[in-house]
Amino acid sequence: MTIPFVKYQGTGNDFVLIDNRTGAWQDYLAMQIPLQFATEKDLVAHICHRRLGIGADGLMLLQNKEGFHFEMVYFNSDGGLSSMCGNGGRCIAAWAFSLGLGDDSLQFWAPDGTHEARKTNDGKGIALNMNPVSRVQQINTNDWELNTGSPHYVSFQDNNIQQLALVDWAKNIRYNEPYTNQGINVNAVNILDENRISMRTYERGVEDETLSCGTGVCAAAISFVQRSQPHTEANTNEIANHLIEVITPGGTLQVSLQRDQNNYNHIVLIGPATFVFQGQL
């Protein structure tokens, strides 16, 4: 038995996508386990392996969900079920549009709840509504911790992050307390001007640097605003329709957001989501 797949990428973050609305994935698993792979996790890791499989930062299933256009089920490249993926959400939404599941906008269920996606005006990208963020914890002068659907550690660097040995540096954070067990995504950020930042990301589950990370981009943008315009009791410092440009190794994304006191809402991740190829597993 074979199963069809497509591959999409969003600013270099690449994903294998499978239509599971008829239960095709479970049928495929029954053929593969335990004959070739011991567990579902082993199979997904093999598919995502860049030498032994297709190669991807993650695998997603598009499934039926009552009240929604679809449900997104996300596996990291190590095969483990994971939390929200922003670029993955934009890619699976782009594919869903091509399948006729929505016209210009759609709603889907993801690991962190409901998301709305819409086509950008030029038709070349996807704008994805992210969930509100109410807790932005400052670790020290330059470092922040927050959850934008996945947990992130954001560190603003004075030195050029392109010269940083990112993986070694990030592992010292990701594999130490308090993050040892659950893990955390680690982001290094340079400030370019009042509306632009550049960043690099080490992703848990991938356990390596990725070319882009959507939830990381949102985390960096929020931390940037919080760092630049801190909230105080005397000054609520509300921010409406703030737009941050975020440059990653895989391309440029935009984050639109609003802040009411210390709560960030109307967070929208905007950027390209591109079909790469299709085939059969």
Image (tube, rainbow, N blue to C red):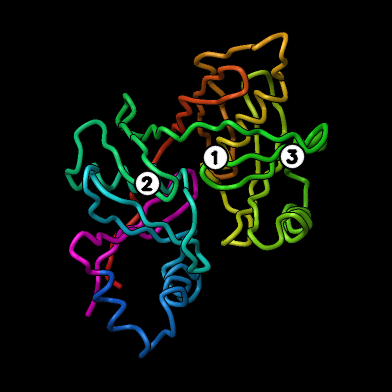
Q: Can you say whether 24 is above or below 91 in the image?
A: below
Among numbered discs 2 and 3, the one appearing first in the sequence: 2
Decide which of 228, 115 is in the foreground and name it: 115
Q: In the rendered structure, which segment of residues is drawn in magenta?
A: 1-24
Tag 3: amino acid? Ser
Q: Residue 148, position in %: x, y?
A: 54, 40
Tag 2: amino acid? Cys
Magenta stretch contains residue 252: no
Among numbered discs 2 and 1, the one appearing first in the sequence: 2
Mark 2 or 1: the one toward you: 1
Residue 59 placement, left or right of 136: left
Q: Residue 186, position in %: x, y?
A: 68, 48
Q: Which residue position is annotated with label 2? A: 91
Q: CA distance from mark 2 to mark 3?
A: 27 Å
Residue 148 is marked as 1
| Residue located at (67% from left, 27% from top) | 224
Element type at mark 1: loop
Q: Which residue position is annotated with label 3? A: 155
Element type at mark 2: helix
Q: CA distance from mark 2 to mark 1?
A: 18 Å
Among numbered discs 3 and 1, the one appearing first in the sequence: 1
**Mark 2 surroundings within 10 Å by alpha-carbon count, few (fewer than 14), some (14 through 19), many (20 or more):** many
Tag 1: amino acid? Thr
Q: Can you say whether 103 is above or below 184 in the image?
A: above
Residue 216 placement, left or right of 280: right
Element type at mark 3: strand
**Mark 3 surroundings within 10 Å by alpha-carbon count, few (fewer than 14), some (14 through 19), many (20 or more):** many
- Give the position of the N terminus as an image quadrant: bottom left
| Image quarter of residue 271 | top left
Q: In the displayed orientation, state which residue is furthest to the top.
A: 234
Q: In the displayed orientation, state which residue is furthest to the front.
A: 233
Q: Residue 78, position in %: x, y?
A: 53, 68
